[in-house]
Image: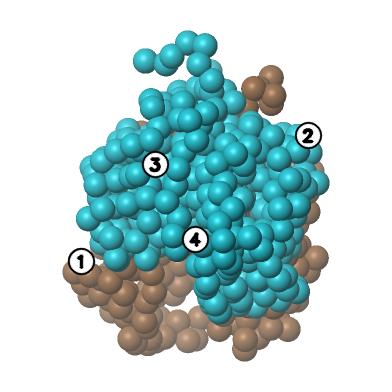
Chain colours: A cyan, B brown
Amino acid sequence: MPRIGCDVSLLVVGSIALDSVITPFGETADDPGGSAVFFSAAAALLHPVQVVGVVGDDYPLGALKRLEARGVDFAGVEQAEGESFRWKGKYSYDLSSRETLDTRLGVFAGFRPKIPRAFRDARYVFLGNIDPELQLGVLDQVHEPALVACDTMNYWIQSKRDVLLELLRHIDTLIINDSEARELSGDWNIYRAARWVLTHGPTRVVIKQGEHGALLMDLERTFKVPAYPLEEVFDPTGAGDAFAGGFMAHIARTNDLSPANLRLAMVYGAAMGSFAVEEFGIRRFDTVTPGEVEARVRAFRDLVHFDHPETVA
Amino acid sequence: MPRIGCDVSLLVVGSIALDSVITPFGETADDPGGSAVFFSAAAALLHPVQVVGVVGDDYPLGALKRLEARGVDFAGVEQAEGESFRWKGKYSYDLSSRETLDTRLGVFAGFRPKIPRAFRDARYVFLGNIDPELQLGVLDQVHEPALVACDTMNYWIQSKRDVLLELLRHIDTLIINDSEARELSGDWNIYRAARWVLTHGPTRVVIKQGEHGALLMDLERTFKVPAYPLEEVFDPTGAGDAFAGGFMAHIARTNDLSPANLRLAMVYGAAMGSFAVEEFGIRRFDTVTPGEVEARVRAFRDLVHFDHPETVA
């Protein structure tokens, strides 16, 4: 039962990284990235965000200050002695695949999320892709969230499957890529894979399909949002976390878990994913205006809506 | 300007084949197939169809008789001396790829479409995937179609590119697979590839994306219909031609080329594509009822529609 008058806050726990990305259009070095950063940059366009994470003593705090000015609260980010988490990757000419050139965990290797007292009442919680043991540890620290959503990746599916299955029993919404859903369920059919997830804990699952959009499924209904048609994609890095940011932030700002509102949240997610890929890293979120966000949501409506004489009221 | 009182007939010119298909779920031998057959089986659920094609003297005419009883007119099908066109293919375990095991053109090698006088006033014409020279030859024989749509394949893109480019200047709608659009345009971005097509003749292009649905684009608008979520897919053969059948038949029965109606035609196409894959060959079309078709169109609406407070009138 929703608590009346409580703080409708949105918490994300995830990585804060420095990304070096090579695409056919150029390259970046040590640009702010990581799941918590992409999530926050997108979400902050709709709702304030509380972040828990860790950075090294070499992290360029100016980047975080810019997000802070937009409503992101980094009070849960610890600055530890050592190097920040760094990832370096290179995309193929058509951006359809990428190769990891280097991963240096740095201080992220010792990350044990500590949720500040002020964040423990968060009503909406997103657990970015980290060790499922740490994700479970976060759940022990938050009080009574209305919705906990969670991401993961192939690495954890393979190396910590049992812990991940335990985690699934404690979350509401799993948000994963299509390839991860297939690997987790052992089923190549994405709808059967989704059904598998729904019989292992979560009441709903969001399956991200890259350039083909995303699916929201529960045991009764399926909703599909396509990806926004873009003739130019610069850098796919972080699109999935930006999607999660838009999805969760729309839910938090409306504090409404009705099926119709979750569909709209999917569209805000897809809109944020489409902005994310238009420039390197989180740069596009420095310039996107609320008006552009709304215009893109309207464009999604125009992309998929059709009238059917029999079904028009 | 639409001619008032004219016959709103729908003509398809394409292959009539015998398919032998191996999927993880079983196999068939010498089952009726080919573009004109899949097109007609789907289209006939919505509108009568006129077929021009060729079969050998070994073709099981009973299969065509069943379609005839449902409103398909085979007066344009010649029975020639020799073997019918045969195709044999095998799908991968997840149906995502297929290998052609054998192709025997038989009488199809000498196919020169002759449009019967009674079919020449067809208002809507679909040119299935055959030699673009033959497709051009059909255009010389029809009088004043309101819309000509056309399919092609990689083989013709590679071997008869100039003729294909000439054909494009004479058709309204190109209906092709995403991989073909990429190959034809030389651009891997599907939206840029579509734009390329739109600057080479057609006023609109339909790009079939298999399990990811289909796009309808003109220079002003893009419409996306996803594929229907199926937990069981038996045989993907012919889904694209069934899609074209649903698309064209809805246009023919409504005789309405408005943008809104073309969107609905895309959904009928996607519905027919989804029925096609539920059983081997055209078998599912023996049992689909008009009520099931309408129910599936409603299901597509439920799959993609969302309310956005700002855009709701």
User: Do discs 4 and 1 belong to a common subunit?
Assistant: no
Q: Residues within 10 Å of mark 1 (few under 14, many from 20)?
A: few
Which residue in the protein does label 4 denote? A108
Instruction: Write down the quadrant of residue B100 in the picture.
Output: bottom left
Rounded to the nearest angstrom, the CA distance separating label 4 from label 1 is 47 Å
Determine the secondary structure under disc 3: helix
User: Do discs 1 and 2 belong to a common subunit?
Assistant: no
Task: Please say if B72 is above or below B81.
Answer: above
Which residue in the protein does label 2 denote? A291
Which amino acid does the dot numbered 2 rest on? Gly
Sequence-first tag of 4 and 2: 4
Q: Nearer the viewer, mark 3 or mark 1?
A: 3
Return the x and y of residue A210 as percentages of the image width and height. Answer: 53, 58
| Quarter of the image with the N terminus of chain A in it | top left
Which amino acid does the dot numbered 4 rest on? Phe
Instruction: Write down the quadrant of residue A109 in the picture.
Output: bottom left
Determine the secondary structure under disc 2: helix
Task: Please say if A283 is above or below A13.
Answer: below
Return the x and y of residue B2 as percentages of the image width and height. Answer: 74, 42
Determine the secondary structure under disc 4: helix
Which residue in the protein does label 1 denote? B25
Which is nearer the eye, A106 or A276? A106
Res. B271 in view: no
Sequence-first tag of 3 and 4: 4
Q: Residues within 10 Å of mark 4 (few under 14, many from 20)?
A: many
Give yes or no for contact between labels 4 and 1 (Cβ–Cβ under 8 Å): no
Q: Nearer the viewer, mark 1 or mark 2?
A: 2
Res. A287 in view: yes
Return the x and y of residue A122 as percentages of the image width and height. Answer: 48, 29
Rounded to the nearest angstrom, the CA distance separating label 1 from label 2 is 51 Å
Q: Residues within 10 Å of mark 3 (few under 14, many from 20)?
A: some
Which is nearer the eye, A84 or A89? A84
